[in-house]
Image (spheres, rainbow, N blue to C red):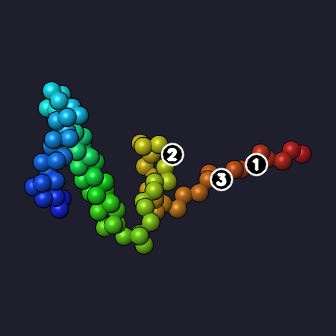
Amino acid sequence: MFGLGPVEIVVIGAVAVMLYGKRLPEVGKSVGQSIGELRKQFTTLQRDMDISSHLDPRTPPRRSVGRRSDDTWAAGDDRTAPRFDPPPAEG
């Protein structure tokens, strides 16, 4: 376990008992919870990094052209602005 022999583990345990005494179970529980939370965060980070490595960098992300979610424009539509007809000339 972490390259520690039995003598080192006994010394660490004795120091922990001298420092924390009766609070040792509470301290052990909080340390265990902290290590568990750290493992969850590391797993989440590792999963996020793994997903991003599978994305193809040559393919640009899809973006919609429309302004609203109910807009029917598609990314491939070649729409232009409406034509503006000037008012008829007087005279």
Residue, x 49% and y 49% (percent of image)? Answer: 66
Helix, strand or loop at label 1? It is: loop
Q: Badge 2 is on which residue?
A: 67
The residue at the far top in this view is: 22
Q: Residues within 10 Å of mark 1 (few under 14, many from 20)?
A: few
- The spot of residue 5 in percent (x, y) is 13, 59
Badge 3 amino acid: Arg
Q: Is residue 5 visible?
A: yes
Badge 1 amino acid: Pro
Q: Residues within 10 Å of mark 2 (few under 14, many from 20)?
A: few
- The spot of residue 41 in percent (x, y) is 28, 48
Q: Residues within 10 Å of mark 3 (few under 14, many from 20)?
A: few
> Along the polypeptide, which appears first: circle 2 or circle 3?
2
- Relative depth, front residue between 46 and 14: 14
- Relative depth, front residue between 9 and 63: 9
Alpha-carbon span between mark 1 and mark 3: 10 Å
Residue 49, numbered label: none
Q: Badge 1 is on which residue?
A: 86
Residue 83, numbered label: 3
Alpha-carbon span between mark 2 and mark 3: 20 Å
69 displayed left or right of 48:
right
> Badges 1 and 3: C-beta atoms under 8 Å apart?
no
Residue, x 42% and y 43% (percent of image)? Answer: 69
Q: Mark 2 vs mark 3: give the one in front.
A: 2
The residue at the far right in this view is: 91
- The spot of residue 1 in percent (x, y) is 13, 58
- Relative depth, front residue between 34 and 17: 17
Q: Mark 1 vs mark 2: give the one in front.
A: 2
54 displayed left or right of 33:
right
Quadrant containing the C terminus is top right
Helix, strand or loop at label 3? It is: loop
